Image (spheres, coloured by chain):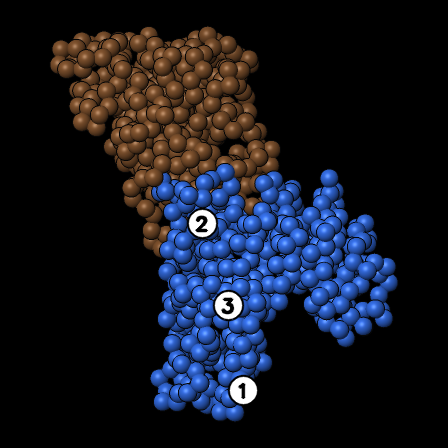
Chain colours: A brown, B blue
């Protein structure tokens, strides 16, 4: 029996690869809703491609209003067409959904994912910021409704695959591997001067801009630690990060008998997407196979939290609990956007986050509304810090050994 | 509820480590029978050690008659004491056994394992030659009685662990890793002159003599291919061998979606022994943990079947089916014993096997008795070939590029 799948973020990297998985398994799926933010032109293109494969979604949502208007002008799509964040939430909570692939970017995923949980729909989650910001609210809600949250991130999918047939209480350690990003071997001095173009070149994975920068700062790995904490319900002390530059082993699990299981493969997100949709089974695929004998010099290193303070901040926020990780996430979203616009430097990203963590009031046991408000306040503070810095760029980007210090940004 | 465990081959490397696992998990086990071949002194020692941990087996068997007599003279053991191969079979088939750890060496395991299956007792199997020689009889008998045969070999345990929670029909490939043995980089010319002392030094694993020589010739890996074929019921074309000199990844499974799972760890047989006894659960252990960041330069190579013809012979015999692998195993047992006695050379091992494969009558669908007879005939032929060669050592060990050819041994 085909299941009705809706995709939040259908034109992003994960969304498009999910459509590939759907088209490769036509008997498994019907399409419910596809949502996009602004890329109405790409949506129209994908609708055409889907139609050729016999797929017509029930409806689409274009969150951005002007993009929505443009889409209505150009499209030949005959289904429902909604607009705005409410439209995205409506698609997420559509009662006909059997499963939701959630690939929104950043905090924007929180409310739609929460809406899906209220509806009782299992979520294949590619939007880690939802758990980073709101895990304390999302996971209890999911447990209460018996809603499964399935990992799509390659690391968490690796862990999920290694946990198949195992008992969570027999897990000794989750070992998240990190490529270490493009700047793995750079000095702090070199990191000060990283340009957006340099940071956007990830050595192993081709991904969206936000996550690529997060990978370069290791914030992405920090978020994955927090995500693993919520997804698998193990203590933070059982989660470890290890740098593995070849990105072949996607993550590992160590059990109480000393045995370690790993999942490995080429860096192809279609495998974890496919697994989240097929588990406990697996769909046959023609994805390129790994040539084991081409694997040479696989290596592993401890991460450097001095040169990559974002990873430390993530661990700290997890230890702190409550809204701490929400603050880290919100500050990071502003910091990354500012870095991509060229208004702050690469190492200003952790500085901005740390400053926000110190200045925003912390709530130990937040409600969903507390989280939404904390996110808003943090963004406002981060934006104003960036603006203040922008007028004094020499101060905003103090050299590590230099005398200049921005009073608004505490150096780690 | 503790289960009654009996151990065939209790003083061998696997047997002793099994006793360690038992003593570390005193609430899980009662001891049924312990069998040994000749090492009555070691048996007495272990009985003392076990007693201090509150374990007294129900009975013991000493297969060798003079060792049995010696044991009776020195022991203070109050339980039943049996002798001979019949005694071993009686212990294997004891109705009180809840599980049998079968760690006999070579063909000697076939009849006791068969007896346990007839009794309906699950077997944790460390004696791969049983499946190599008699898989065609053993596995249908086990299936018919619903008896589980659980892998203890580190490679097959790795596969078993990777298959937990998965579906056999979604397996694309079983990838057995091989250390490559101590002679991985030796030329054929060098291999002609390998001494027993050199071959007994395995780079990664400390094991019994027979299996250490089998590892050096890659016959062990060949047997593991055949064992995997019988244990997991996948086609021979789905089983692959890859040389991995570090022996960290113990084996892998590739699934139909392109995903690969691996089990890894330090080379410690206690982990696979423990898993075979605990699965689907895992016993907590204090076995030394692997330091992931100490892993560097993990590498993988295709095996060389020209320098290591034993591996090719195993694949060939699997393709041939019937009694072919039984012939290979019997010839190999004689060849290894002769090599260890210094009466034939290292590369005479595959030559002797190949000659036996050509000269012994093949039976396509053998009975257990056919297998026992084929084993006997092959041993007799192999022994006579070795004896003929012993009188003309220059001929028995022809140099690869030399003119001498032993008419009794076909070079591969």
Kindly identify which numbered label has been placed on residue B252.
Answer: 2
> Is the residue B160 above or below the residue A370 in the image?
below
Of labels 1 and 3, the one closer to you? 3
Question: In the structure shown, which secondary structural element does the residue marked by tag 1 occupy?
Answer: helix
On whether disc 3 and disc 2 are found on a single subunit, the reply is: yes
Could you tell me which quadrant the C terminus of chain A lies in?
top left
Q: Is residue B160 left or right of residue A377?
A: right
* Residue drawn at 54 percent across, 87 percent down: B387
Which residue has dot 3 on it?
B326
Q: How many marks?
A: 3
Kindly identify which numbered label has been placed on residue B387.
Answer: 1
* Residue drawn at 52 percent across, 47 percent down: B160
> Is the residue B390 above or below the residue B7 in the image?
below
In percent of width and height, residue B320 lies at 40, 65
Instruction: Judge by depth and name the residue closer to the eye, A177 or B239.
Output: B239
* Residue drawn at 48 percent across, 50 percent down: B232
Instruction: Judge by depth and name the residue closer to the eye, A208 or B165.
Output: B165
In percent of width and height, residue B61 lies at 75, 64
Q: Residue furthest left?
A: A74
């Amino acid at each position: 029996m085909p299941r009705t799948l809706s995709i939040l973020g259908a034109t992003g990297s994960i969304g498009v690869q999910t459509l590939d998985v759907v088209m490769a398994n036509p008997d498994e799926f019907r399409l419910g809703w596809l949502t996009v933010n602004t890329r109405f032109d790409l949506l129209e293109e994908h609708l055409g491609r889907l139609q050729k494969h016999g797929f017509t979604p029930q409806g689409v949502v274009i969150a951005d209003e002007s993009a929505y208007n443009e889409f209505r002008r150009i499209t030949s799509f005959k289904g429902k067409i909604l607009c705005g964040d409410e439209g995205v939430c409506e698609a997420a909570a559509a009662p006909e959904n059997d499963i939701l692939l959630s690939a929104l970017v950043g905090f924007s995923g929180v409310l739609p994912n929460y809406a899906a949980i209220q509806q009782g729909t299992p979520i294949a989650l590619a939007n880690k910021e939802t758990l980073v910001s709101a895990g304390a609210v999302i996971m209890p809600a999911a447990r209460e409704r018996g809603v499964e949250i399935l990992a799509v991130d390659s690391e968490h999918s690796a862990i999920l695959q290694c946990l198949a047939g195992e008992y969570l209480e027999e897990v000794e350690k989750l070992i998240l591997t990190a490529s270490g990003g493009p700047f793995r071997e750079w000095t702090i001095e070199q990191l000060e001067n990283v340009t957006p173009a340099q940071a956007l070149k990830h050595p192993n994975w081709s991904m969206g801009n936000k996550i690529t920068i997060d990978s370069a700062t290791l914030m992405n790995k920090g978020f994955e630690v927090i995500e693993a904490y919520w997804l698998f319900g193990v203590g933070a002390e059982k989660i470890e990060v290890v740098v593995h530059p070849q990105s072949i082993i996607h993550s590992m699990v160590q059990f109480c008998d000393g045995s370690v299981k790993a999942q490995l493969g080429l860096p192809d997100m279609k495998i974890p997407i496919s697994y989240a949709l097929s588990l406990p089974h697996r769909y046959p695929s023609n994805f390129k196979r790994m040539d084991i004998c081409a694997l040479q010099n696989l290596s592993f290193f401890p991460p450097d939290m001095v040169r990559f303070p974002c990873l430390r901040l993530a661990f700290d926020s997890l230890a702190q609990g409550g809204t701490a990780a929400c603050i880290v996430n919100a500050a990071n979203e502003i910091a990354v956007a500012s870095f991509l616009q060229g208004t702050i430097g690469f190492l200003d990203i952790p500085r901005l986050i740390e400053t926000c963590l110190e200045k925003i009031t912390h709530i130990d046991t937040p409600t969903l509304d507390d989280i939404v408000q904390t996110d808003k306040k943090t963004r406002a503070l981060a934006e104003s810090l960036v603006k203040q810095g922008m007028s004094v760029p020499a101060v905003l980007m103090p050299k590590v050994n230099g005398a200049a210090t921005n009073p608004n940004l505490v150096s780690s």
